[in-house]
Amino acid sequence: MLLLITDTCKALDENETTLGVYLDLSKAFDTIDHSILLKKLDFYCIRGQALDWFSSYLYNKKKQFVHYMGSNYHVETIKYGVPKGSVLGPLLFIVYTNDLPRCLN
């Protein structure tokens, strides 16, 4: 953060143009398209039984909820994205966004 502030102040002092791009990734895990993710996993040589397992993990996990003291809370149907709080969620998100810099000009 200090480097960002220092560089911005220096650029402004030298009458240079400054530009900031900020991304809000708070709902990013919820927007992952399963078919695109599976194609990317295939590109990274995840094939056969392993790819079938990921497909089953993404498509057959229709509902997510919190079970506490014998009751289910926050029941949600999953259509896109990866299951919240899952161990694989961050890894699958990285696979999904790994080629993002190559898509930008």
Image: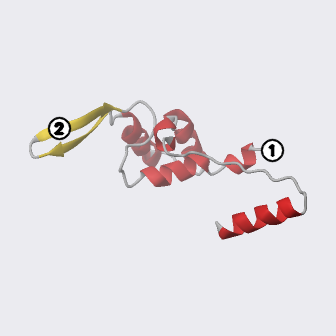
Question: How are the residues colored?
Answer: secondary structure
Q: Residue at the far front: name it.
A: 13
Badge 2, how many Cα within 10 Å: few under 14, some, many 20+? few
Secondary structure found at label 2: strand
Residue, x 31% and y 32% (percent of image)?
76
Residue 46, given in percent of the width and then of the height, sits at: 52, 50
Q: Which residue is mark 2?
A: 72
Residue 102, given in percent of the width and then of the height, sits at: 74, 48
Residue 45, given in percent of the width and then of the height, sits at: 57, 51
Residue 38 numbered tag: none
Name the kind of residue labelled 1 in the image: Asn
C-alpha span from label 2 to label 1: 46 Å
Secondary structure found at label 1: loop
Residue 76 relative to residue 13: left or right? left
Q: As rendered, which of 41 and 50 lies closer to the eye? A: 41
Q: Which residue is mark 1?
A: 105
Which quarter of the rendering shows the N terminus?
bottom right
Which quarter of the rendering shows the C terminus?
top right
Q: As rendered, which of 21 and 15 lies closer to the eye? A: 15
Residue 32 relative to residue 2: left or right? left
Name the kind of residue labelled 2 in the image: Asn
Please report whichever mark, 2 or 1, sits nearer to the chain's N-terminal start: 2
Badge 1, how many Cα within 10 Å: few under 14, some, many 20+? few
Residue, x 44% and y 49% (percent of image)?
50
Q: Residue 82's quadrant in the figure? A: top left
Q: Residue at the far right: name it.
A: 15
Q: Is residue 68 above or below residue 9?
A: above
